[in-house]
């Protein structure tokens, strides 16, 4: 691992660079340096359970504390990284950092950590091995790890993706389908995958009270997920009213600014308590 780290500062010229514009190249070069310099940070956002009012997991979301440009969000640098192998370094860094942070984030050992995986990383032949190696290096139980994969990533090479997900599942890692409803996954294909969770794309959740068609999609995804034996999570929950509707629809888990924004690990403990309190006062249905 150390020897790999040493290359990170310099992004060597590779023939595949020819196809990229200079902005992408500059960004990728800087980002390689940034990983080596420790400029990336993870913020964490809780996932709250509607069935028992607890926080079950936190999702790690990467940010770049840029020395000149301030805090950059994934939209500003991930698309460039995803065009090159640098995304694999980033994925390994995220796994390692989240793994390292987990004992302090969660002294009770109950929380799972969710990590977003880009299509390009999922497509690597040795992706499973990479993941399991990093987790082992940081003594992270694979059962406490959820990998969030978008429909688009699956559809790039559905058969390879299915094989990779099977390997990860065998090792105990949970699989979540992120931004569900925004892509074009075949339902027949989806039903064969070892999935634990569907995350409803936040576009549907954000608009579900202003447009009945969005509410219909949200209800359908919840029903579909349950029929296939998956947990269903709604992302983008910003209001109490939406949370209560989701609860009435028997959505399992929620994530969104109402519960907590993504925040640095130091601030997480307080937010976890606040999120549980919020669920306690918001959920109307009696809990077991
Ligand atoms: P995502 O995985 O679907 O994450 C949800 C995004 O919605 C996050 O944006 C989050 O901050 C934001 N969000 C959370 N709650 C709310 C809410 O209530 N309302 C609204 N409007 N937005 C909310 P963020 O952090 O900017 O990340 C954007 C995307 O970048 C993520 O979408 C994910 O696809 C990708 N990403 C983030 N971190 C990583 C990473 O470490 N690796 C990879 N490969 N992708 C990442
Ligand atoms: Mg996600
Ligand atoms: Mg999402
Ligand atoms: Mg997204």
Image (spheres, rainbow, N blue to C red):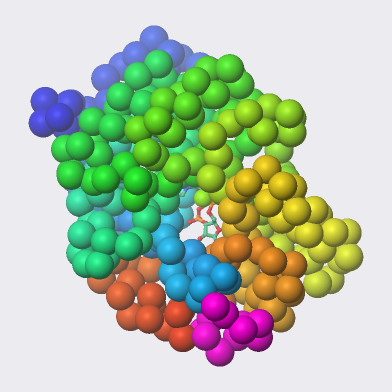
131 sits to left or right of 191: left
Q: Considering the image in quadrants, where does the N terminus appear?
A: top left
Q: Residue 235 vs residue 268: left or right?
A: right
The residue at 78%/59% (across/down) is 219
Instruction: Provide residue 35's location: percent of width, then percent of height.
Output: 25, 41
Nearest the eye: 259 or 42 = 259
Judge whether 101 appears above or below 133 on screen.
Answer: below
What segment is highlighted magenta in the picture? 278-288
Q: Is residue 181 left or right of residue 16?
A: right
Q: Could you say where residue 224 lies in the image, as x and y percent from the top left? A: 74, 48
Residue at left 88%, top 65%? 212
Classify the position of the C terminus by image quarter: bottom right
Residue 231: in sight, yes or no?
yes
Question: In the figure, residue 191 lies in which quadrant?
Answer: top right
Looking at the image, residue 103 sits to the left or right of residue 157; the answer is left
In this rendering, the answer to whether 213 lies above or below 108 is above
Magenta-span inclusion, residue 72:
no
> Residue extending furthest bottom?
281
Determine the residue located farthest toward the right in the rendered image. Answer: 212
Please name the residue shown 63% across and 28% down the image.
192
Name which quarter of the figure residue 95 lies in. top left
Percent from the top left, x then y, of residue 5?
Answer: 16, 32
């Amino acid at each position: 691992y150390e020897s790999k780290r040493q290359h990170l500062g310099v992004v060597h010229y590779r023939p595949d660079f020819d196809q990229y514009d200079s902005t992408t190249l500059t960004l990728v070069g800087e980002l390689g340096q940034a990983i080596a310099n420790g400029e990336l940070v993870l913020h964490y956002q809780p996932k709250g359970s509607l069935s028992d009012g607890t926080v079950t997991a936190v999702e790690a979301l990467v940010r770049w504390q840029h020395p000149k440009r301030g805090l950059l969000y994934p939209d500003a640098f991930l698309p460039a990284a995803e065009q090159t192998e640098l995304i694999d370094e980033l994925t390994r860094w995220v796994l390692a950092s989240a793994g390292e942070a987990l004992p302090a984030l969660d002294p009770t050992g109950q929380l799972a950590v969710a990590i977003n995986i880009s299509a390009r990383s999922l497509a690597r032949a040795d992706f499973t091995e990479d993941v399991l190696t990093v987790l082992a290096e940081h003594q992270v139980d694979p059962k406490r790890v959820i990998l969030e994969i978008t429909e688009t990533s699956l559809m790039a090479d559905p058969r390879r993706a299915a094989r990779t997900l099977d390997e990860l599942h065998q090792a105990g890692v949970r699989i979540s389908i992120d931004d569900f409803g925004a892509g074009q996954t075949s339902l027949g294909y989806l039903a064969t995958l070892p999935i634990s969770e569907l995350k409803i794309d936040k576009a549907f959740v954000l608009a579900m009270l202003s447009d009945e068609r969005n509410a219909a999609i949200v209800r359908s995804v919840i029903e579909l997920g349950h029929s296939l034996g998956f947990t269903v999570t709604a992302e983008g929950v910003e209001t109490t009213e939406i949370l209560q509707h989701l609860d009435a629809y028997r959505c399992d888990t929620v994530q969104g600014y109402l519960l907590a924004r993504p925040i640095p690990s130091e601030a997480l403990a307080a937010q976890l308590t606040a999120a549980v309190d919020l669920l306690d006062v918001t959920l109307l249905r009696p809990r077991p």
